[in-house]
Image (spheres, helix red, strand yellow):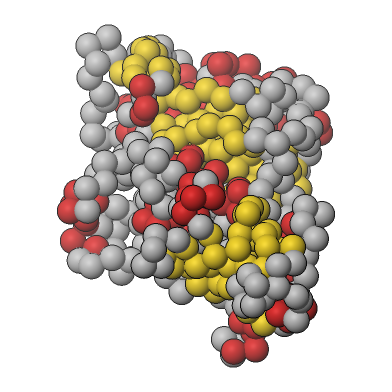
Amino acid sequence: MPLESNTRVVSELASRGYNAEREAVTLLAGADDPASAIEGVVERAADDALRITTEDVRAVLTAEPVRDAGVETGERTESPLETEGSGGASVPAIGRDASGATGGDDRRGRDDQRERDDQRERDDVAHRDRDPSRRELSVGNDMTGQSTGTGEYADFVRTFRDRYERLSTMLRGRVNHRPAEAIASMAGGSDAAMIGLVNDVRSTRSGHWLVELEDSTGTFPALVMKDKGLADVVDEILLDECLAVQGTLADDAGILFADAIHFPDVPRTRTGGRADRHVQAALISDVHVGSQEFMADAWSRFTDWLHTPEAAPVEYLLVAGDMVEGVGVYPNQDEELDVVDIYEQYELFAEYLKEVPGDTEIVMIPGNHDAVRLAEPQPGFDEEIRSIMDVHDAQIVSNPATVTVEGVEVLMYHGVSLDEVIAELPEQKASYDEPHRAMYQLLKKRHVAPQFGGHTRVAPESRDYLVIDSVPDVFHTGHVHKLGWGKYHGVLAVNSGCWQAQTDFQRSVNISPDAGYAPILDLDTLEMTVRKFS
């Protein structure tokens, strides 16, 4: 059977354990006899080679033809069922037979692999209409290679000064701002408003709240009276975030009685971007390859589905961190590892990534389990790990980063700060069961990690890369291993779950993961379908 599409060429190479340069794939697909050309390239490749180069292909195409590589066919036995997903939402389930039983454990058995490859050959016919020339993908706010911080005190000052300047600009059109120094010299009883970073927030003996704001000129206290109806707003305040307080100075001008509190927030009405054709992106995170609880069967069902006609519109895959389980991330983690070497974990992840259709555009950011610094922003991987994961020319960018996909702006952030938001805010404002509500808080604060000095480590840089300058169309996070999505002022917030079953550590802290889900986003309508593969 001829291999006339790029996708099918990549699939055939992946089944033999190779990835390839894009030009090499194009040359193979355009050969007079692609199957023979692939056979020749594979025979020519060195025993330890993992990547087919353009040079390899040219050498074979200019040499004598080799024997034809036959392709066997087989029938797909899996059938989709409807099942209940997290939060009671009905989502399509893929990869169970009529009895509901899942496939065997030997995922990489030769017969099973041949059957999947044969089915992919047939299914990939539907992918011929995927035209890479129509794709548009750009990355913004990528700080990889841009780090300037040395850890000195002055670096932290620059980071917070930059945070204040950019976030205060978002608030200046809403209040008649005065610096702390100027407010201190105003007459008692004057109306005043101040924009600052929250230096302290505490309750008084009388049940009121004292909020101390700091700007570049000094600090000034604001008193929020319990009868002002602002308790719900005070509940949402985190240390170090930027906000505006508007009110009246006391008679002695020593304190500001608050009448209103403003967050930078997202505008309630805005016009977002849309693709001008029907095309989709799969949003996933927290794959955790290397863990004993990595759900290889579910991943295989997901990648098998990506090769079907139904998944032909899925031309983008956005991965929000934690590709591998890592080493030494939490106490006694080594007891739960299937692969104990971090480099071998990435090598295995690269093998799993080869199962994704080869012409899919892939963007990945790191997470707290990945081999990068823990402090945010996290740069993309170093060259050694990049070379290991050099599959399908995936783009590896920093955490966070903004990815614009055919006009749709997607803010990708792994989500470590969600732990802090959930811990600090009331349950109705943020919880693990509804992680998207915690994401709403980050959008409201226009910062992905507003609180400093807690669980979320922040690296000092000359620029605060954690500020949400541009309002995204989609906010995509992971980390908490829970599935949740919803819209906040028109922004679709998606936490995409994970691909790891419950570990002993998660069980000890009462975390029940939502595993084996893949949110599929329509880029032309921003409607979303969640598919379950576990």
Looking at the image, the residue that sits furthest to the top is: 98
Residue depicted at x 52% and y 46%: 229
- Which of the 4 image quadrants contains residue 296? top left
Question: Residue 365, position in %: x, y?
Answer: 56, 55
The residue positioned 29% from the left and 14% from the top of the image is 97
Compared with 455, 483 (above or below) is above
Residue at 52 percent of width and 22 percent of height: 529
Task: Pick whichever, 248 or 510, lies toward us.
Answer: 248
Residue 413 falls left or right of residue 215: left
Left or right: where 234 falls relative to 332: right
The residue depicted at 53 percent of the width and 32 percent of the height is 486
Is the residue 355 above or below the residue 143 in the image? above
Say whether residue 68 is visible: no
User: Measured from the top left, where is residue 235 in percent x and y?
Assistant: 46, 53
Q: Is residue 99 above or below residue 69?
A: above
* Residue lying furthest front: 251
Q: Which of 39/483 is in front?
A: 483
